[in-house]
Amino acid sequence: MNNPRFNKFIEGMTALLDKTSDEEIVLAEGRTLLQELVAHDDWLDDAYAQPHPEYYQQYRLHVCPQGRFSVVSFVWGPGQKTPVHDHTVWGLIGMLRGSETALRFSVPEAGKTMEVLGEDRLEPGDVDAVSPTIGDVHQVANAYDDQVSISIHVYGADIGKVERHVFNTENGAAKAFISGYANA
Ligand code: FE
């Protein structure tokens, strides 16, 4: 990706992480930067906006050379959704196009049914956050069953290398996974 809006966002995130690694500050100031980025839907290359008929797609847009953060376009085909999963690092989700819904879950405990804490809906321009500190387990879905939706995700690591987990909501059982990138 090489676009003035996107480059400005990467410069802002880089300056922020040069200044601090305090998660609270990173999430607060990163939220403002991501809000500016997703306030306009005129910068994402079509190559990173392509849905797949079966699977939601995660395109790598940027990985910090020091591995401190990564940026992904998350492209939902109609009706697609994730399993219940965690991230293990901080994450910011900015809605660019369409809409998505997220079910938030309690921290999984082996042998226990997982509790739904609430549901959020993101519309274009909205930003949400996750992390092990503020709540890290959710299930996300395209809010539409007849159109593509796209959100921009920022994570506090190279998310294509992070081992994280999917969960069985009936018994809290965890299974490790690495999400990777559609354009790796
Ligand atoms: Fe997620």
Image (cartoon, rainbow, N blue to C red):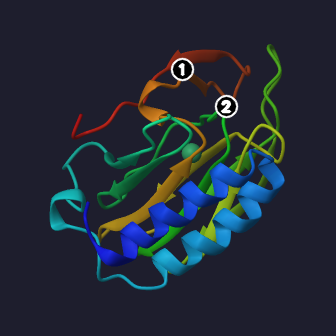
Q: Quick one: quadrant of the C terminus? A: top left
Left or right of residue 62: residue 23: right
Does dot 1 land on a helix, a strand or a loop?
A: loop
Report the residue at 50% width, 35% height from top.
66
Quick one: label 1 or label 2, which is nearer the N terminus?
Answer: 2
> Would you identify the image quadrant in which residue 145 lies?
bottom left
Residue corresponding to mark 1: 163
At x 57%, y 15%, the residue is 175
Q: Is residue 34 in view from this perspective?
A: yes
- In this rendering, is residue 137 above or below 145? above
- Where residue 119 appears, as percent x and y from the top left, is 71, 61
Look at 38% across and 69% down and name the residue there: 6
Give the residue displayed 78% in from the left and 48% down from the top. Answer: 23
Distance (Cα) linking label 1 and label 2: 8 Å
Name the residue that disc number 2 marks. 88
Mark 1 neighbour density, 10 Å: few (under 14) some (14–19) many (20 or more): some
Question: Which quadrant of the frame does ligand 1 lie within?
Answer: top right
CB atoms at circles 1 and 2 under 8 Å apart?
Answer: yes
